[in-house]
Image (tube, rainbow, N blue to C red):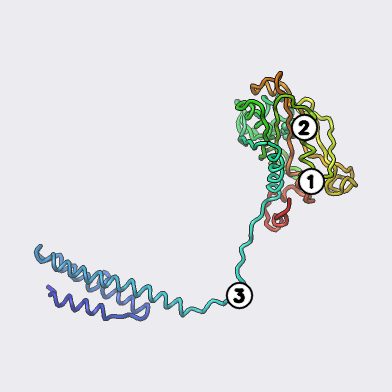
Amino acid sequence: MPTHSEIQTLLAEIEQNNPQTAPELEQFRLDYIGSKGKLKALFEVLKTLPPDEKKTFGANVNQVKQAAEQKYQQLKEQLSEVVDNTAAPADLTMPAQTTRLGSRHPISLFLHRAVSIFRSIGFQIADGPEIEDDWHNFTALNTPEDHPSRDMQDTFYIQTNPAVLLRTHTSPVQARYMKKNQPPIRIIVPGRVYRNETISARSHCQFHQIEGLYVAENVSLADLKQTILYFARQMFNKDVQIRLRPSFFPFTEPSLEADVTCFICHAKGCPVCKYSGWVEILGAGMVDPNVLENCGIDSQKYTGFAFGMGIERTTMQIYGIKDIRLLYENDARFLRQFAGSL
Ligand code: DAH
């Protein structure tokens, strides 16, 4: 059995052993700590001792083991620092690696700007699901069974009977909100919508809309007109004029479409407005009493207006973007151009 003094000698040996290089350090590990090292041998001896000797001998061997491991760790750290210090110094004259700042997508720029304009006149933001049921997307909105927009060709159905679909417009959020809230209601709904359309330079199967809804006592077409005018002047420029044309939507009566004087050429005529001087921005109307009743609102007491604005077309017109697909390709070189505008 190794005596106490032999253990002390081993300890001293470890203390005096000072490897200077990585291979020397590895030899140190093998000699003392490794599975064939001197310490391992001592632990083998320990196993064979009677219990009363085990205790002191074990404590001594453990002390040596700790000393060896500690020294090994210390030397390892020192050596790795040495390696770092001897590496070629960093070239401080090299140009720094730059991190490019991201920028908002043009669609987001438009949405944020539009939302902040409507918020400034008391509209609150409401939200609804993109996967919608037939009732909210069509039935509640007075859309007849045989309306073409209900057709498989136009709408992405996820399930039939009962019908579950990708919402074709943001209008179903009108119904969702009115079911839960009584007037006065003044909301805008920015969001993504889907239609089963062939993707081309001018149309896509997904796009964005902003819906607006104002229901209270005595809301009239004059309020709608003033709201559109205010929005257009804030959004485009303060001299913009608006034009309201009669139209049809199942959920409004009367219905209209609103144009603004071309914000690029100031109505002089240019390719953006196709030389007409006008650019269409939204569909709107007075909420059909049937819609109010479908959603539990007393149509004798309350009236309201609603509008729906497509975002992509107008954004494309503002920026002169000729192909809608560019908006979804996420090419950073394209997107970077719009940073800081609007
Ligand atoms: N939902 C219509 C569409 O997607 C747009 C629209 C028109 C919304 C008139 C309205 C509205 O709220 O009153 O074509």
Given residues 149 and 264, the one toward you in this image is: 264
Image position of 310 with respect to 23: above or below: above
Between the residue at mark 3 and the residue at mark 2, the CA separation in whole angstroms equals 60 Å
Mark toward the start of the polypeptide (3 vs 1): 3
**What residue sits right under mark 1 in the picture?**
236
- Residue where numbered disc 3 is placed: 94
Q: How many marks?
A: 3
Query: Earlier along the polypeptide chain: callout 1 or callout 2?
Result: 2
What is the three-letter code of the residue carrying label 2? Leu
Mark-to-mark CA distance, 3 and 1: 45 Å
Tell me whether circle 3 and circle 1 mark residues in contact (CB < 8 Å): no
Find residue 89 and report its horizontal and vertical position in percent. 52, 78
How far apart, in angstroms, are the residues tagged by discs 1 and 2? 18 Å
Q: Residue furthest top?
A: 300
Q: Quadrant of residue 234?
A: top right
Task: Give SS at disc 1.
Answer: loop
